[in-house]
Amino acid sequence: MKIAVHITHEAVQKIGGIGSVIAGLITADPYKEYFGRSFLYGPLFNTEGTASSRLGKDGVVLYSGLDQYDIDKYTHVFSPIEKKYNISIVYGKRIVSSETDPNDYQETETILVHINNMFQDHIDKLKFMLWESFGIQSERYGDWDYEQYVRIAVPYTDILNAVISKDERIVHFSHEYMGMPSVLKVSIDRDKGRRKNCKTVFYAHEVSTARNIIEGHEGKDICFYGILEHGERKNRSMEDIFGDRSDFYRNELVKRTDKVDHIFAVSQFTAKEIKFLNPGIDEKKIATVYNGIPIKNINLEAKKKSKLIVQEYCRNLFNFTPDHTFTHVTRLVDSKGLWRDIMLLEELDELFHKNSKTGFYVLLSTLIGTGRSSNDIVRMEKDYGWPVLHKEGWPDLVGLESKIYDMVSHFNAKSKSIKCVFINQFGFNAHSCGNRIPRSAEWIDLRIGSDAELGMSVYEPFGIAQIETVQFGGLAVLSDACGCSSLIKEKYSSSENSFHIIDFTENINRLTIRQLQDINVERRTEIEKYEIEKNAEEIFKKITSFNDDKALKNHLETAQSLAMKIDWDYIVSKNIIPAIKDKKEL
């Protein structure tokens, strides 16, 4: 039997894109056919609550050493390991469902480890091994984020050996840097002759050093990708050009991916970034394995119904029914380039006004997730008109949310034909987001009802949210920095009204590497405005191109049929399984 173990910080709670990828991956039919068992492995972040709650609402706890809880006689399996390392283990099963079809699911074994009180000598031993074998200087990193992922690596192989027989073949997936200490521990054990029948995979959902550089540089993607593709760069590495990053533990862990068996890069850009970070890496071990999207079949009536819901929401907020709706559903981080949305909306607002059209833009992004209670939402809505108007401080604006609201409110103050709403609460229903959302609204209506999803990120290794609306006949407006842009160009080449990609590096090819490094905010803004102004009219034409039901129906049917080439089943069968198979299996 082939067994997959996914080492991740999202073993129980879906926090970001990695959780969505894991859900899509392990519920795909080709994955389920190839792997007989799947495990999720990670740290136990929270000791509050009861034993039965430790694996979330979709989990069943079979054993919790933290709570002296054992309903299936696992004490003899885990207790010796817990005593050896002074840890607590939680073991059980979770149902992981497809994001669009709850009936499509996979039962997944889940192991969480509470490592806060671990015996120090075991931690020190592994840190010495990481230095001896891989040159990682753990003493330089006092961050708990680094420490916890080293600690879960300490008992990792002992725990797996206790629940998986020795003749089984295991594929260890390190999802991002978090699993690297564990897969490096596997490599050390394998070199010593312990459980050789296994493979190690670094699943590169991003390259942490690249993100760190782009988010910290005033030139953002224009500087970084201009240099990445520059003819003068040759074999100069990321650190040769942008400086030594050895004090950044994620950099050091990701650089050691040259020691794993396979690297799965979620886009061509991510693969290039890995080679940029490690120019001497064996390119044969790098495979581009795009993310997929969950597919949902709809017809024209469903499309129009969802759009009516979004239009009604606009009418409830702004007292008009928009001709067209735009969305941007995203995490609230600098890399999403949200200021570019406002730049584009300013251009579109002029075009809409000139052509007697109206529009509604929904920005759904938050630092809190669903942390605001329904009572908080209703009170803010009643007291001062949330989410059209916001106030500083909890339970409303926190951190970067204030900056985003400033941009939105300034736009609304001067716009003529398009209005924006910033929903700083995840979800799209009356319970989560207020009484002015129609009672029949569901999350999926925001995806189906959108005419265009904006996503002009400065760093986006893939970008699932940007292309979720494409299958529903929406237009994906992307920057050339989005990893999904090459996939969408390839699979949707016959449906150009499904995407529009703005190349922000198009006119900088004459600049030297030094000049690219010197790009400041003012110069970057000039470039962004120039490219957005140049593309705005074509984007407007694509958004407004379906003026009757027949044209929209034909476009929707095309978009739905092409989506089969970017769904998880297709991606797993064509990219992921072939990349991981042994030669004798092919």
Image (tube, grey):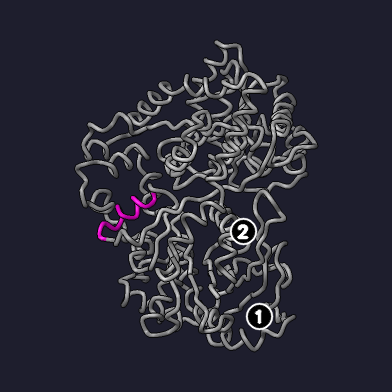
Q: Residue at x 34, y 55 (%)?
A: 274
Residue at position x 73%, y 43% in the image: 432
Q: Residues within 10 Å of mark 2 (few under 14, many from 20)?
A: many
Q: Residue at x 67, y 29 (%)?
A: 388
| Closer-to-camera residue (420/6) | 6
Q: CA distance from mark 2 to mark 1?
A: 29 Å
Residue 279 on the magenta segment: yes
Judging by the rendered image, the residue that carries numbered circle 1 is 65
Residue 456, given in percent of the width and then of the height, sits at 47, 35
The magenta region covers 270-280
Task: Where is residue 565? Give x, y as percent.
Answer: 53, 45
Vertical relation: 139 (above or below) 480? below
Nearer to us in this view, 49 or 561: 561
Q: Nearer the viewer, residue 135 or 284?
A: 284
Nearest to N terminus: mark 2 or mark 1? 2
The quadrant of the picture occupied by the C terminus is bottom left
User: Which quarter of the figure has residue 450?
Assistant: top right
Indicate whether residue 533 is drawn in magenta.
no
Per the image, label 1 sits on a secondary structure element best described as helix
Does residue 575 sit above or below 229 in this rendering? Answer: below
Q: Is residue 415 left or right of residue 201?
A: right
Give amino acid for label 2: Thr
Residue at label 2?
A: 27
Q: Secondary structure at mark 2?
A: loop
